[in-house]
Amino acid sequence: MGNVMDAARFFIDTFRSSEDLMTNLRLNKFLYFAQARSLVRLKQPLFDAPLQAWHYGPVVPLVHSQYKKDGKRPISDRASYSLEGFTPEQRETMIDVARVYGRYSTAAIVSMSRPSDDLRDLGRDEGTCDLSNEKVMECFQQKGPLGRFSISEKMPRLGRRDSDGYLCIPGE
């Protein structure tokens, strides 16, 4: 099992040059997706830090606290990280999560991170309810498998940035 801060810094680094830079809110959703997909795909957690149900979806309190200083701005952390604590399968899962969910805006992944009324109800008392691995796995088992990365895969570019920097969906 890997260190949650190493997983967090992996996602920050992965999206450092993308149009949607990693914010605290976005990062916590990626960690949730990575934990959930690891539980479903590998039948083991990616990291041992607890997830909690908050108003805007699941959060890793340790990570949220670390990057709270950045507010809504992109995270400025450039600390090194190591993926040595993760198995090759866990690293592959993190790459697949970045590839699949990185296509979406932060607003879309916030919406996706609240997959059921059960989790929304748990988040009413923000920060007071830990999400068990069993509950997280149960929510994601219904979503179907996470696709695996293929070098021959063509990645569609979804959306564009307008002059104010907002992500626009094609056709808007």
Image: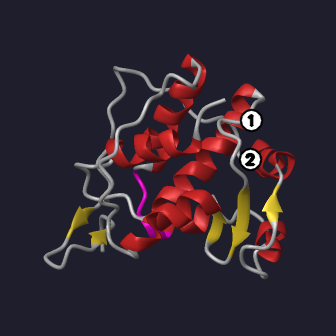
Q: Is residue 130 rendered to the left or right of residue 102?
A: right
Q: Position of residue 153 (x, y in %)?
A: 37, 27
Task: Identify the image quadrant of residue 42.
Answer: top right
Q: Which residue, given by chain and number where applicable, does mark 1 sit on?
A: 40
**1 and 2 marks in contact (CB < 8 Å):** yes
Q: Which mark is residue 140?
A: 2
| Residue range of the region highlighted in magenta in the rendering | 103-107
Q: What count of labels does the image hold?
A: 2
Residue type pointed to by label 2: Phe
Q: Is residue 43 rendered to the left or right of residue 69?
A: right
Secondary element under disc 2, as helix, strand or loop, is helix
Residue type pointed to by label 1: Val
Q: Nearer the viewer, residue 25 or 97?
A: 25
Instruction: Please say if 59 is above or below 83.
Output: below
Residue 109 appears in the picture as rendered? no
Q: Nearer the viewer, residue 139 or 63?
A: 63
